[in-house]
Image: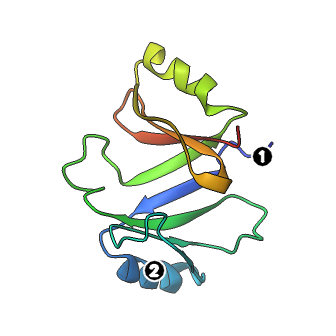
Amino acid sequence: MNTNVVCWFEIYVDNLERAKKFYATVLGTDFHDMDSPDGSDDFKMSCFSSSENQGVSGALVQMKEARTNNPANTSTIVYFPCEDCNVEESRVEKAGGKVHCPKMSIGEHGFISLCIDSENNTFGLYSMQ
């Protein structure tokens, strides 16, 4: 199990190429583009570092209407590691939040839940189970 309190982050952008150029210039980092799971242009992702990175990593994400007309207020999502995100997801509403997207598979990479905290911030839960 990952011992970092955060295991992944996503910064949602309107223009992926512009954002990549910005972060490459500011941080001096390279990006690794990932294929869209559904093959469409509605979802694009470019990771900050290679898969060999042993620390916390993340990606820039361009997704149709993620930043507009979205009650989840998607700008940046921090993912917290779990053994099974169903467990933490079951506590969200009792704590004053909302489950925006219940546990779903992300293929060989495991599972995620997207939730909204008591302050209307989106956060994610991540597990391999």
Residue 2 numbered mark, or none = 1
Mark 1 nearby-residue class (10 Å; few <14, some 14–19, many ≥20): some
Q: Foreground residue, 91 or 103?
A: 103
Where 21 falls versus 83 (above or below)?
A: below
30 or 40: nearer the viewer: 40
Secondary element at tag 2: helix
**Residue 18 lies in quadrant:** bottom left
Tell me where residue 49 sits by quadrant.
bottom right
Secondary structure under badge 1?
loop
Q: How is the image coloured?
A: rainbow
Percent coordinates x, y for residue 46 in the rendering = 51, 73
Q: Residue at x 62, y 23 (%)?
A: 87
Q: Residue at x 21, y 55 (%)?
A: 68
Sooner in the amino-acid sequence: mark 1 or mark 2: 1
Q: CA distance from mark 1 to mark 2?
A: 27 Å
Residue 19 falls left or right of residue 70: right
The residue wearing badge 2 is: 20
* Position above or below: 68 against 92: below
